Structure formats: structure tokens, C-alpha cells
Amino acid sequence: MTAIVEGFVYPSKPIKIDAGAPDPETGYNIAPTQQVCLLYPQEGQQLVSTTARWWFVPLWHKGSVQDWKATTFNAKIETAHEKPTFRNAWKDGRCLILATGYYEWSGTKANKQPHRIYVEQNQPVMLFAGLQAQRKDGVRTCTILTREALPEISDLHPRMPVILNGEEAEQWLGHAENDAQIRSSFGTHWDGRFRHHKVAKFGAREDGPQLIESIENTLI
């Protein structure tokens, strides 16, 4: 993911800051296992702004988060509700994960080309549908839900994060739509506002604003 934005104001609900949460990563190359910003509902009304380790670990796992070996930084929205790893969080751990964009790679394995993907919108951040859980030791972990990619970016990758508009975000957190409707349509109403451009190749530990600079105009 690219840079996390601080100071985002979510409409219609008060936001409580979790002062005891670990500091988030705020760079341009956020990777799984790092701390990301998220919002989750508390008692159905107030939203809590906190951070979580981006690699979901279910509460029934008895080892440490480092002992969990399954690849769970993403979860399919089509099946998360029924998977043992995610189904409890689907019911009780819905959240919004904040980012300004994300990267996807095209091309062959030996010659991968990174692209920055973002959404043309009025609000400063993208709202990814996510699931989160806090363990007894206080460690909070999360995953980003994905779905089949929309036509605008399906040439880059067959799947994409579930990116919610404002109405969907409230419905997702408030369980205001049935699960079948969420699985089939949430994150699909962007009407061609996705944008992407090629960026220079970068390593896993590289960071800085140069990572999101276009090397070729490929607006769609």
C-alpha cells in the first residue's frame, strides 16, 4: 500500500483515538506485518481509530502472531464469512483500513512492472473493507478483503481490494446489508474512476515519494 493519511474525518460518527495503539507506518511502501491505520465500530456508534498488524491471526490461535504461518493478509470477500480463520471477525470484527492507494505488478515473473492504483474521489483516502481482531496479549491484527478485479484494472491482476464508497462503508460497519449483497456488490460502484500509472521498480525496503511518481502516463 502507499502512504497512510492522518487526520481523516469520517462522516456521521464520532471518532475516538486509541492512544495506546502502536504507531502506524506512514511511508509509501507498506508491507504485510507492518502497522496500518484502521477504523472499527465500538458498541455500534462510536468509531475507534487505531492500528493493527497487517496479517490476520484468528483469536483461537494459541501461539504468537509470529508462529502463525498461513498467508492471511488478504481474504476473499466471497468466502471469508464461512472460513474458520475469518468467520468470527466477519461477524464481530469489521473495519475500514485506510490508504491513499496500492501497488499491483504486471508482466512476467522475471520482469514485473509495478503500477500505482488509486481512485479519483473527493475524500483523501481509500477505504478498504477489512477484518480485525485483538488478542488477549493486546496485539491487534487485520486483513484486507479482496474481490474479482473491476474491468478498469483487471489487465493488471485478476483481484483487487474491496474499496468502499461512503455509503458502503457505513453499511459494512453497521451490518446494514445482508451478507449476500455485500459479497456480490460491495466495492463495485466506482464508475470508471480508477486510475493507475507505471512507477519505477523498487525493492521491498525502499520508501519515499518517488515510489508513486509516474514514469509513463497511463491514466484509464
Image (cartoon, rainbow, N blue to C red):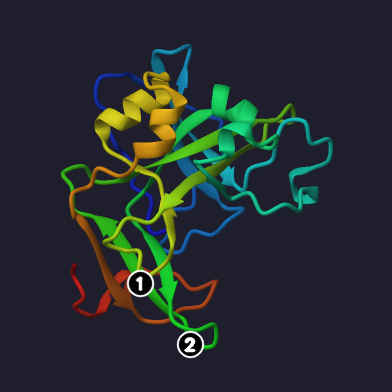
- As displayed, is residue 1 above or below residue 43? below
Residue on which the image places disc 2: 111
Q: Residue at the location (67% across, 54% down)?
A: 71
- Image location (x, y in percent) of residue 126: 31, 46
Task: Determine crowd level at label 1: few under 14, some 14-19, many 20+ residues with C-alpha closer than 10 A.
Answer: many
Give the distance between the C-alpha atoms of the residues marked 2 and 1, in whole angstroms: 13 Å
Examine the rendering and report whether any part of residue 120 can be seen: yes
Amino acid type, label 1: His
- Image location (x, y in percent) of residue 125: 29, 46
Res 204 → quadrant = bottom right
Q: Residue at the location (62% across, 48% down)?
A: 55
Q: Quadrant of the N terminus?
A: bottom left
Q: Quadrant of the C terminus?
A: bottom left
Residue with the most extreme right position = 62
- As displayed, is residue 74 above or below residue 44? below
SS at circle 2 = loop
Q: Residue at the location (35% across, 64% down)?
A: 154
Q: Residue at the location (63% across, 26% down)?
A: 88
Front residue of 71 and 215: 71
- As displayed, is residue 108 above or below residue 139? below
Residue with the most extreme bottom position = 110
Amino acid type, label 2: Asn
Task: Determine crowd level at label 2: few under 14, some 14-19, many 20+ residues with C-alpha closer than 10 A.
Answer: few
Front residue of 155 and 96: 155
65 left or right, relative to 123? right
Q: Which mark is residue 130?
A: none
- Image location (x, y in percent) of residue 195: 23, 62
Examine the rendering and report whether any part of residue 23 can be seen: no
Front residue of 154 and 36: 154
Res 186 → quadrant = top left
Residue on which the image places disc 1: 115
136 left or right, relative to 217? right
